[in-house]
Image (tube, rainbow, N blue to C red):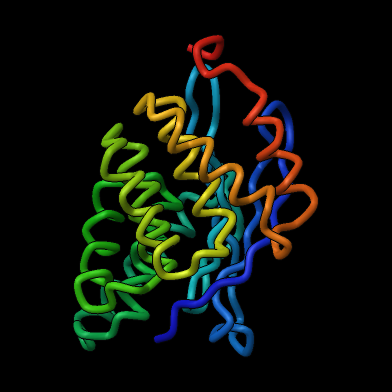
Amino acid sequence: MTSKSLKDFTLSGGQKAVVWLLGLALVALFVSSLTYRMSHPGNKVEFQQRSSGGGMPGGMGEGMSEDAMKHVRELMERMGKDPENMEIQLELANSFMMIRAYGRAQTFFEKVVSVEPKNVQALMGLGMCFYQAEQFEKAAEAFDKIVAITPDDSMALFNAAIVKKYYLHKHEEADVQLKQIVDNPKASAEMKKRAEEELKRDAHAEQ
């Protein structure tokens, strides 16, 4: 499985939802969206990850819980028959994220990364699991690994910068990554705008 990525996102509300499209290798596949909002008193890290399998039915509403659980059971059955299939493992991780079972999702993301250390989807999901668990050093490390693989990945740069700025107090490192987004001709106008806004924002005022 290849792990290159495309990205494009918009921000809604105070910190608008980040939308990003993953997987050049997945363009021929049917993929479904999985959106998360990780909150902090001063800032938010949000993303939309596209899974590599058939996708989760429905959306994130409460009415989808039963369908989500059914899909998880189906994936578990498939995994039992093909335990080394990383595509199923990744879809299971995304499915557990859908029902906010972050610990279980982390287990499967870690399995994928152990086999495919350059899988950008798995690294992004793993970073979000660490973020949710308030393991901010590990979250930043996961996002930085994506940047090492795909230096132009503005989403990974943005997430890493937000974690470093608001949780790890590594303001200089955060600013460097935000400036990389601003200076990147491949970054979208909206991404550059958000990075510029973050560069102007006082992290201490958000605490």
- Image point 31% across, 36% down: which residue? 136
- Image point 72% across, 47% down: which residue? 192
Residue 97 position within the rendered picture, expressed as x and y whole percent measured from the top left: 40, 52
Hey, which quadrant is residue 202 in on the image? top right
- Image point 36% across, 39% down: which residue? 131
- Image point 40% across, 53% down: which residue? 143
Q: In screen coordinates, is 14 left or right of 39?
A: right
Decide: is 203 above or below 79.
above
Decide: is 14 above or below 174.
above
Hey, which quadrant is residue 188 in on the image? bottom right
Q: In screen coordinates, is 28 left or right of 128?
A: right
Decide: is 179 above or below 111.
above
The single residue placed furthest to the right in the displayed view is 189
**Which of 11/51 is in front?**
11
Residue 102 position within the rendered picture, expressed as x and y whole percent measured from the top left: 32, 46
Residue 162 position within the rendered picture, expressed as x and y whole percent measured from the top left: 50, 35
Which quadrant holds the N terminus?
A: bottom left
Q: In screen coordinates, is 8 left or right of 103?
A: right
Q: In screen coordinates, is 171 left or right of 195?
A: left
Q: Is residue 101 visible?
A: no
Hey, which quadrant is residue 15 in on the image? top right
Q: Is residue 165 visible?
A: yes
**Which of 48/118 is in front?**
118
Residue 64 position within the rendered picture, expressed as x and y whole percent measured from the top left: 54, 51
Q: How many numbered dots are placed on residues in this image?
A: 0
**Which of 37/115 is in front?**
115
